[in-house]
Amino acid sequence: MACLLGCSAGGAVLVVLPALLIVSSALKYDPTWASLDTRPLPAWYDEAKFGIFIHWGVFSVPSFRSEWFWWDWQGAKYNDTVDFMQENYPPDFTYADFANQFSAEFYNATQWAQLFQDAGARYIVFVSKHHEGFTNWPSKYSWNWNSQDVGPRRDLVGELATAIKNTTNLHFGLYHSLYEWFHPLYLADKESNFSTQNFVNSKTLRELYELVNTYKPDVVWSDGDWEAPDTYWKSQDFIAWLYNESPVKDTVVTNDRWGQGVMCEHGGFFTCSDRYNPGHIVNHKWENAMTIDSQSWGFRRNTVLSDILPIEQLLEQLVSTISCNGNVLLNVGPTKDGIITPIYQERLLQMGSWLKVNGEAIYGTKPWIYQNDTVTINVWYTLNNKTNPPVVYATLFAWPNANILKLGAPVTTPNTAVSLVGYKGSPFSWTASPGQGLSIIMPNINPNDLPSQWAWVLKLTNLTF
Ligand SMILES: *[C@@H]1O[C@H](CO)[C@@H](O)[C@H](O)[C@H]1NC(C)=O
Ligand SMILES: *[C@@H]1O[C@H](CO)[C@@H](O)[C@H](O)[C@H]1NC(C)=O
Ligand SMILES: *[C@@H]1O[C@H](CO)[C@@H](O)[C@H](O)[C@H]1NC(C)=O
Ligand SMILES: *[C@@H]1O[C@H](CO)[C@@H](O)[C@H](O)[C@H]1NC(C)=O
Ligand SMILES: *[C@@H]1O[C@H](CO)[C@@H](O)[C@H](O)[C@H]1NC(C)=O
Ligand SMILES: *[C@@H]1O[C@H](CO)[C@@H](O)[C@H](O)[C@H]1NC(C)=O
């Protein structure tokens, strides 16, 4: 290990003087989880709450089944996928042949950036390379299997990085798969029970350093780690470099997919599983990676409307996740020609229209003492304690019967005020329940005058807690 200034003492210093961590950027992290896990998550990430995930690659060409298409065809050999190839392609057609049809002719990164801003997102995570190994940037380490040499003949990552960095609200992040299903060097390392590291040394790590140095992402979202230990991937060395010396050392966040058994244990924010949403508070910052198409991350031509989540469900995911200390990373799958189809656009813009009214209950908030109400189900709480007095937000997905909403969690004071975010006819009257809780008398509001559709946010001030 190349031990730089303060490196070996880093762990001990952190334990004794945690305040130093905040003021001193000279402190170095050791390449051990014990040290790396002490790094505070850069504040922007928790405040952002909502990001967009983008799965785009050669798999977007067949756009059948999912982004796992190649594996489903030639790894798992699922019948529907094998049949699809037999019925539609000549017998000698290879997966690599799909790359020529990855055309991207309608890809306009500026338009994507505008859409993600209109969706109310604060960061994006773009798939730079999925398990198929095709790099969406002109990597020096992916000869003839990258977006500059075949297919789009463009630097897809670079164009999006430029457009996203040109916005005021969005942070730029990259997804990267450590493993590649069929890479010969990976398969040879696997054959040796990962006692050799030729794939990691000549491919994975070189790509990761190249990506970070070239595109300076604020998120490194790792995946494809689970077959091999973190020592095989040299994850801790890479993350130590990322936190100590990389061009994004002060802003970058990482996830937790860095080797067998690491997920949900070490790293930056926890992802724990795809679509993770435990429904209770998790004190370590976490992320719910969600899809709009319930069946796939990559675009599917044969998606039917019932596969697409309605906005009500997406908003429930958003609000319940944030109440429990998570962020939501909502996925879209563009087509091979670079289009984010209207059904995805609609969901994103619906999200944006809701957040435009109710964003104060989302961005920059913290979980409250209660995450959801104790009397009325599906009412979710967040807290803004940066204001004086602090504000507790309660988001409801069903308008209360007879216009009376009973909440069990809040403890009122005589000065407690209740209003509806975005509605001018506030504050509302309420009566305290015995001991704890209150009944809020909602006025008769003409549906045309409701500040938002799908879900409503009550703002409660001057509570006791
Ligand atoms: C797949 O096809 C084979 C051969 O036709 C058949 O035996 C098998 O039951 C099929 N499997 C499924 C899951 O449909
Ligand atoms: C991309 O879209 C923007 C905004 O609509 C437009 O101004 C620009 O000309 C487009 N770029 C290309 C290369 O078509
Ligand atoms: C940068 O932002 C400006 C102002 O929003 C916009 O007009 C321009 O098209 C953007 N450029 C790129 C490359 O995204
Ligand atoms: C890998 O591990 C398996 C199971 O423990 C063993 O059978 C095999 O011989 C090992 N291979 C090598 C190359 O060490
Ligand atoms: C909310 O919390 C209560 C416990 O007070 C629990 O029983 C309930 O299932 C939770 N979930 C929802 C969606 O309200
Ligand atoms: C209020 O915010 C501060 C700073 O973020 C935090 O340390 C504290 O725990 C918060 N209070 C509550 C009740 O969450």
Image (cartoon, rainbow, N blue to C red):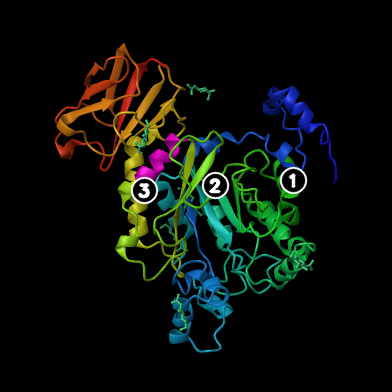
Give the Cα distance between marks 3 and 2. 18 Å
Q: Assign the C terminus to one quadrant of the image.
A: top left
Residue 271: give its label.
Answer: 2
- Left or right position of 119 against 282: left
Q: Is residue 435 above or below residue 124?
A: above
Q: Is residue 221 above or below residue 399?
A: below
Q: Is residue 430 above or below residue 41?
A: above
Q: Say which residue label 1 marks.
A: 241
N-term mark: 2 or 1:
1
Circle 1 — which element? helix
Could one spot residue 40 in this view of the protein?
yes
Q: Residues within 10 Å of mark 3 (few under 14, many from 20)?
A: some
Give the Cα distance between marks 2 and 1. 22 Å
Residue 125: give its label.
Answer: none
Q: Quadrant of ligand 4?
A: bottom right
Span shown in magenta: 314-324
- Left or right position of 368 against 95: left
Q: Say which residue label 3 marks.
A: 314
Q: Are marks 3 and 2 in contact (CB under 8 Å)?
A: no
Residue at image coords 30%, 30%: 421
In magenta stretch: residue 177: no
Question: Mark 2 or mark 1: which is in front?
Answer: 2
x then y, percent, for residue 459:
32, 26
Circle 2 — which element? loop
x then y, percent, for residue 191:
74, 69
Query: Please, what is the dominant secondary structure of the magenta stretch?
Result: helix
N-term mark: 3 or 2:
2
Instruction: Give the amino acid at mark 3.
Output: Leu
Circle 3 — which element? helix
Instruction: Give the amino acid at mark 1.
Output: Trp
